[in-house]
Image (tube, rainbow, N blue to C red):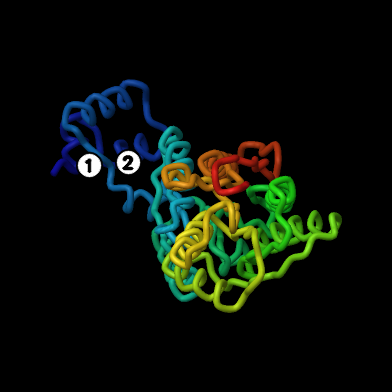
Amino acid sequence: MVTIKDVAEYAGVSVATVSRALNNSGYVGKQSRIKVEEAIKTLGYYPNEVARSLYQKSSKMIGLLLPDISNPYFPLVAKGVEDYAQQNGYMIILGNVEDNIEKEDMYVKFFSQYNISGVLSAATGKKSQNYQVPFVLLDRALEEEDYSIATDDHLGGELAAKAIIESKGKQVVVMAGPKNIAGANDRLSGALGVLNSKGLSYQIFETHSYQVDKAEETAVQLFESTSHFDSVIASNDVYALAVMKEAIKRGYRIPEDIQIIGYDDMLFSRLMYPGLTTIAQPAYELGFQGAKMLVDLIEKNSSEHKKVKLKPKLIMRDSLR
C-alpha cells in the first residue's frame, strides 16, 4: 500500500509539503506541486480520507438517513442523491433508520465521529438542531426546518380525491398515513378538502406506519374493520397493492367493485395487472435537488431557495373505473 511518505520520497519533497498539497492547507511552490501530482499519479496513491477528515474536521462524505430502504420509493431518492453527490466529488454513507429513533441516534453519533460534511434526512426523529453540520430535510419537510425539499403532498391528496370523484366513487375509504409525518397529514387534508366540497361520503382508516412489512396486515384490518365502500385512496403504492391483493382474495373485482388509487408511482405499480392508478412523486428529482441544496450549503454557495416543493401528478392506469 502506497503511503504519503512514499509520495514524498518519489517527489523529492517533505511529507509536510505533500500534506499541504493534498489538503490545500498552506503554500506549496508550483514545481513542488507538479512533482507531488506526478508522484501521486505514478504511484497510484489514494489519500486516507478518514485521516484527512480528522485533520480538516470535515470530509467529502454525506450522511443520508432513510426511514425504510425496503420501500421502493426511497432507493429512487437515494439514487438521485448519489448521482449529484458523485458528480461533485462526494460519497454517500447510508443509514436505514426503519423509523427507529434509537437507530437514528446511533447514526447521528456515527456521522459526528467521522466528520461528515453534511446530512440529508428523510427520517422523522433527529432534526437539524442535533447536527453541527449543514442539514437538509428530504421528503418529510417541517416548517421549523431552515432547508427542506419535499413533494406538495396537499396537492397530491387533492389530485387523488378528484380522480376518485371523476371515476364515479360513491363511498370512499381514505387511508391516513402516520400522524407524525407532515406529508401524510397534508395528503389527508388535501383529499378531505375535495371530498367535503363535493359532499361525498367517506371513512378515514388510520395507519401508523409506511413500513412494507405492515402492508398486508393493514389491508386485512381495513376489510375487517370497514364496510360498504367502493373506493380506496391508499397512503402509498405499497399499501394500495396490498389492498388490491386482499380485495381480489375476497372475491372483489378491480376496479368494477372496488377502485383504488396509490401514491408514489413505483415501478411495480405499472407492471402488475390491473395497473395501479397513482399519484407520482418525483423521487429521483427530490434526491438530486436535495443533494444539490446540501452541497451548496457545505461549500457556502448561495442557495436560491430554502424550502422547495415539487409537484406531483396523476398517472392513470386500470385500477380506477
Query: Label 1 sits on what residue type?
Result: Ile
Q: Nearer the viewer, residue 208 or 276?
A: 276
Query: Label 2 sits on what residue type?
Result: Ser
Q: Is residue 99 left or right of residue 149?
A: left
Residue at far bottom of view: 225
**Which residue shows up at 41% across the image and 37% down it?**
86
SS state under label 1: helix
Q: Mark 1–mark 2 contact, CB under 8 Å? A: yes
Residue 299 picture quarter = top right
Q: Residues within 10 Å of mark 1 (few under 14, many from 20)?
A: some
Q: Nearer the viewer, residue 26 or 74?
A: 74
**Which residue shows up at 53% across the image and 76% down it?**
221
For the residues labelled 1 and 2, the Cα–Cα distance comes to 8 Å
Q: Earlier in the sequence, mark 1 or mark 2?
A: 1
SS state under label 2: helix
The image position of residue 95, as x and y in percent, is 41, 60
Q: Is residue 112 visible?
A: no
**Which residue shows up at 86% across the image and 56% down it?**
197
The image position of residue 17, as x and y in percent, is 31, 36
The image position of residue 136, as x and y in percent, is 59, 52
Say which residue label 2 marks: 19
Q: Residues within 10 Å of mark 2 (few under 14, many from 20)?
A: some
Say which residue label 1 marks: 4
